[in-house]
Amino acid sequence: MTTYFLLQYQFINRRFKDANLPPILGYLLAALLFVGLSLYLFYKTTFAQPIYIAIALSVISPLADSRRNDFLNLCFGNAKQRIVRVIENLLVSLPFILFLLYKQYWLSALCLTLLASLVALIRVSTTISITIPTPFYKKPFEFVVGFRQSYLAIFAAYALTVIAICVANFNLGIFAVMLVFVICMGYFTKPENMYFVWIYSLNAKRFLFTKIQTALSYVSLLVLPIIVVLAIFYPSNIWWLLLFWLVGSGFLVAIVMGKYANYPHELGITQAIMLALCISFPPFLLLLIPYLFVKSTKRLSHLLP
């Protein structure tokens, strides 16, 4: 069991080294970003505690994949596998728990600890046995696959919009808008097989513009119902809605560019840190997007004409 966690630690260190960052510096930057973003969240909204717990649970949820748990079961046996899973969840959620304790939210810290432990006993199957229709039929791939894996979260965002109207809380509606954008950003975190890039009869720049156009049109299809409903009930705040729509679109474009800036590898730690910095200062996107676009073009030039 100790060897398993040591290998995980070495894997994280290797990811930092691949990003040309010394592990110590990588951990330090990650800690500073985590604390900064956490402080920003609690400063910005009164709903920070439930949102914070939800973020923590979303971070540890991939660890509950059934295939991953089957592998751990083969390695350790059923009893030790459960212990490993509990330790994993607690280690990943530990920064969130410590920050809640720092803010003296004792009950929220206790709830997160219990939930993280309970989630370790749950297995999530990533295999879908039914075909869920989607509106993304012309240019499938990211949004078709992503929507079928996250449709419950999309519907939860719509439910939050209804709640925001019922309790007259516009900020909760804005959170629902940004939640849809965050979900859609997750569709672009994994690189596809080279064949699915090579088949495009486009040069690198046209390919990237096509990807951006598809991402923006499809995310607008998902987020437009929320914005329209909020605009009807909060007409004086329509400019805020448009602003958050624009900011969310900027982050989505940056994620798309970041996906191909390190292609065929996953999103690099350096790019992830730069994206995290943009959360505290969104205008930085105006510099980051062109930088990632140039880097993506170079990375794809050997695959596309």
Image: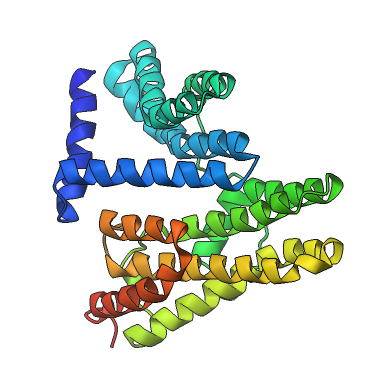
**Residue 87 screen position, x and y as percent:** 36, 20
Q: Nearer the viewer, residue 273 or 190?
A: 273
Which of the image's four quarters has the N terminus?
top left
**Residue 98 screen position, x and y as percent:** 42, 26
**x 26%, y 59%: residue:** 265
**x 59%, y 49%: residue:** 150
Q: Is there any visible trace of residue 14 in the rendered image?
A: yes
Q: Nearer the viewer, residue 218 or 193?
A: 218
Vertical arrangement, residue 270 with respect to residue 104, above or below:
below
Vertical arrangement, residue 17 with respect to residue 302, above or below:
above
Give left or right: position of 55 versus 171: left
Q: Nearer the viewer, residue 119 or 77?
A: 119
Q: Nearer the viewer, residue 269 or 129?
A: 269
**Residue 175 screen position, x and y as percent:** 65, 52
Identify the image quadrant of residue 143: bottom right
Identify the image quadrant of residue 290: bottom left
Give left or right: position of 75 versus 217: left
**x 76%, y 47%: residue:** 159
Give left or right: position of 265 versus 123: left
**Residue 158 screen position, x and y as percent:** 74, 52
Which residue of the protein is positioned furthest toward the top in this rendering?
A: 79
**Mark count:** 0
**x 14%, y 56%: residue:** 20
Which of the image's four quarters has the C terminus?
bottom left
Vertical arrangement, residue 194 with respect to residue 52, above or below:
below
Q: Is there any visible trace of residue 132 in the rendered image?
A: no
Which coloring applies here?
A: rainbow
Identify the image quadrant of residue 5: top left
